[in-house]
């Protein structure tokens, strides 16, 4: 098992991490900073106004992030 400090093969895989700026379960400021440090090659997206469940808070914004990540129209 790889540690969180060794992303292994993920470095070669396109990764998007989208984080709700109002997430109070996994606090945006601390956890997004940690994610950026562990996966610096990933695309990091802040989702303004979204909490821990961004699909409920802003489905359109989630769909946009998913479409951008996958290259879909």
Image: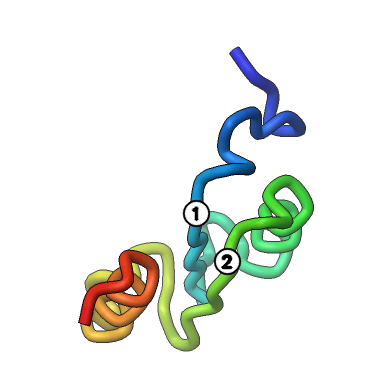
The answer to whether residue 2 is left or right of residue 15 is right
Q: Nearer the viewer, mark 2 or mark 1?
A: 1
Residue 13 lies, with reference to residue 63, above or below; the image says above
The secondary structure type at the circle numbered 1 is loop
Q: Residue at x 74, y 61 (%)?
A: 33
Which quarter of the figure has residue 28? bottom right
Q: Residues within 10 Å of mark 2 (few under 14, many from 20)?
A: few
Q: Which residue is drawn at 41% across and 79% down?
A: 50
Q: Where is residue 6 in the image (x, y as percent from the top left)?
A: 73, 29
Q: Which residue is drawn at 58% across and 31% down?
A: 9
Residue 8 lies, with reference to residue 11, above or below; the image says above
Q: Which of 57 and 4 is in front in this view?
A: 4
Q: Where is residue 21 in the image (x, y as percent from the top left)?
A: 55, 77
Task: Name the residue that disc number 2 marks.
Answer: 43
Task: Name the residue that disc number 1 marks.
Answer: 14
Distance between mark 2 and mark 1 Cα atoms:
8 Å
Which quarter of the figure has residue 41? bottom right
Which quarter of the figure has residue 49? bottom left
């Amino acid at each position: 098992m790889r540690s969180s400090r060794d992303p292994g093969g993920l470095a070669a895989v396109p990764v998007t991490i989208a984080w709700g700026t109002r997430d109070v379960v996994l606090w945006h400021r601390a956890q997004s900073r940690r994610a950026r440090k562990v996966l610096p090659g990933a695309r990091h997206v802040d989702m303004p106004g979204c909490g821990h469940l961004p699909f409920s808070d802003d489905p359109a914004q989630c769909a946009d992030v998913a479409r951008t990540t996958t290259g879909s129209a």
